[in-house]
Image: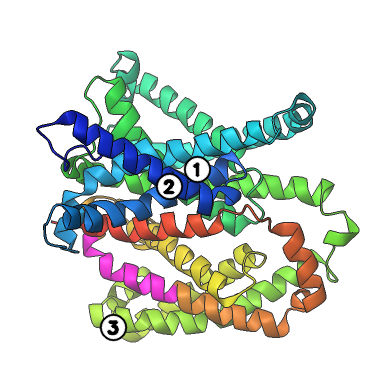
């Protein structure tokens, strides 16, 4: 992982430093984050977040300092360290998190036969639901792969060049990834919004594992962790994110039906109002909160001249028409935020983080995917299109943050379910000490915002 910077003429010295630092980072993970890695899914997310943070501390700070170089916290320095980023994520973070959670389960007796028998049904249910959700995500991702002629490359995994073989392999892989998503995160997913966000994080992880690592290794090309390979694979990153969004959405909807039927009948989990009333209130507060987010986004749109483009959705070109259309879209997205994240945030800080994640997701869904389709064009997943739309990412983040904060203010004031006594019961029921939500925020926000900058020429 780090043998290159340390005494390249003496490989054993580089290896010794590598093992020493790896052991130290692993000990730090166990001391500070070990109690949070209670499941394989939470271990994976915390391992990835830990690796991401240490990539920033190591190649961008510590290594230049030790070697007597200058600390250049620039995009160019991050580009140079991009191969190390993928190495940290794949070769260290993922392995560390999964290995730690597995060893912890063995040492604490979580894998005793009686415990395993009790979890068998839950395991298979999560795998089946996840496989179904993965198939839906694979359909959307497969539509792009069909247009760019990617299926013959996938067929090369079994020494074939038939598009039909590649298509079949793609859907098999989609189902397997979806099933693994359900198995890994079944104990972490509680709401539709968080499930979608977990799907986004899992999509990013599989972008690194799939087209940049496992697939080229299988084809005999070695891992493709170079900056140029990452730039070429950027459209696939967007596809993996769209796959993850659909994966999380479908999984959570089916899982939610199961919980409503068999879990939330518990009197402690009941709320004083019916689901219809709660949903209508969430929609209304989401629409009101979207006024703050829409106005924050408008500042960016005015500066970038994007309002006439938005107006073209309804056949107009004026900025005023664009503003009206923009605010209508903002209201729709705000209403969906209220429905999806009503049960996720209990503080302003948590609400802000969920809002930023939601804004990031809509950057990939909106100007890169849905808006081009509505205008009769192809999806704008190439790197050049994403870089051209990067100012819009800032606007989406501003929209998400402002909407989430305004929504949280309305929830605290007008939602009866947020009364202190009931909030304590619901928080205890829906949140566990081993939650990986902060790790999810770190992985999605840092990589989602940083990767387009690193790939910029």
Disc 1 residue crowd, few under 14, some 14–19, many 20+, Cα 10 Å: many
Closest to the observer, 328 or 253: 253
| Cα–Cα span, label 1 and label 3 | 41 Å
What colour-coding does the image apply? rainbow
140 to the left or right of 421: left
| Cα–Cα span, label 2 and label 3 | 37 Å
236 to the left or right of 132: left
Residue beneath disc 2: 48
Percent coordinates x, y for residue 237 in the rendering: 33, 46
Which type of secondary structure does the marked residue at label 3 adopt? helix
Percent coordinates x, y for residue 92 in the rendering: 38, 39
Closest to the observer, 181 or 302: 181
Q: Which of marks 1 and 3 is in front?
A: 1
Percent coordinates x, y for residue 266 in the rendering: 88, 54
User: Does residue 358 belong to the magenta stretch?
Assistant: no
User: For the point 40% across and 46% down, which residue is it?
Assistant: 25
């Amino acid at each position: 992982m780090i043998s290159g910077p340390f005494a390249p003429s003496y490989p054993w010295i580089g290896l010794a430093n590598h093992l020493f630092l790896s052991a130290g980072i692993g000990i730090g993970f166990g001391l500070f984050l070990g109690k949070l890695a209670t499941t394989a899914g939470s271990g994976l997310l915390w391992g990835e977040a830990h690796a991401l943070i240490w990539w920033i501390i190591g190649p961008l700070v510590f290594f230049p300092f030790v070697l007597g170089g200058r600390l250049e916290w620039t995009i160019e320095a991050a580009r140079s360290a991009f191969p190390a980023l993928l190495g940290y994520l794949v070769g260290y973070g993922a392995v560390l998190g999964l290995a730690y959670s597995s060893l912890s389960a063995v040492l604490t007796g979580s894998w005793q036969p009686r415990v395993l028998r009790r979890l068998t049904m839950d395991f298979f249910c999560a795998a089946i639901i996840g496989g179904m959700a993965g198939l839906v995500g694979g359909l959307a991702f497969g539509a792009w792969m069909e247009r760019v002629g990617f299926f013959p490359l996938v067929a090369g995994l079994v020494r074939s060049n038939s598009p039909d073989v590649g298509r079949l392999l793609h859907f098999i892989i989609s189902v397997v990834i979806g099933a693994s998503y359900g198995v890994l995160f079944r104990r972490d997913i509680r709401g539709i919004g968080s499930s979608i966000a977990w799907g986004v994080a899992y999509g990013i992880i599989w972008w690194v594992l799939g087209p940049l690592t496992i697939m080229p290794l299988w084809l005999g090309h070695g891992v493709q962790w170079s900056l140029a390979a990452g730039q070429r694979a950027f459209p696939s990153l967007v596809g993996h994110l769209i796959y993850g969004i659909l994966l999380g959405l479908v999984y959570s909807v089916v899982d939610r039906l199961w919980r409503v039927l068999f879990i939330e009948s518990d009197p402690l989990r009941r709320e004083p109002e019916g689901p219809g009333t709660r949903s209508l209130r969430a929609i209304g507060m989401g629409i009101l909160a979207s006024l703050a987010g829409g106005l924050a986004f408008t500042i960016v749109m005015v500066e970038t001249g994007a309002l006439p483009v938005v107006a073209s959705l309804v056949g107009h070109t004026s900025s005023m028409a664009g503003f009206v259309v923009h605010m209508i879209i903002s209201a729709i997205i705000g209403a969906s935020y209220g429905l999806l994240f009503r049960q996720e945030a209990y503080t302003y800080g948590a609400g802000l983080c969920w809002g930023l994640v939601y804004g990031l997701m809509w950057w990939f869904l909106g100007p890169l995917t849905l808006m081009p389709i509505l205008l009769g064009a192809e999806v704008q997943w190439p790197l050049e299109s994403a870089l051209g739309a990067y100012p819009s990412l800032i606007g989406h983040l501003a929209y998400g943050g402002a909407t989430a904060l305004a929504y949280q203010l309305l929830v605290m004031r007008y939602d009866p379910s947020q009364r202190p006594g009931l909030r304590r019961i619901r928080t205890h029921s829906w949140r566990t000490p081993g939650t990986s939500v902060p790790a999810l925020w770190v992985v999605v926000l840092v990589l989602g915002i940083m990767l387009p900058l690193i790939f910029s020429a």
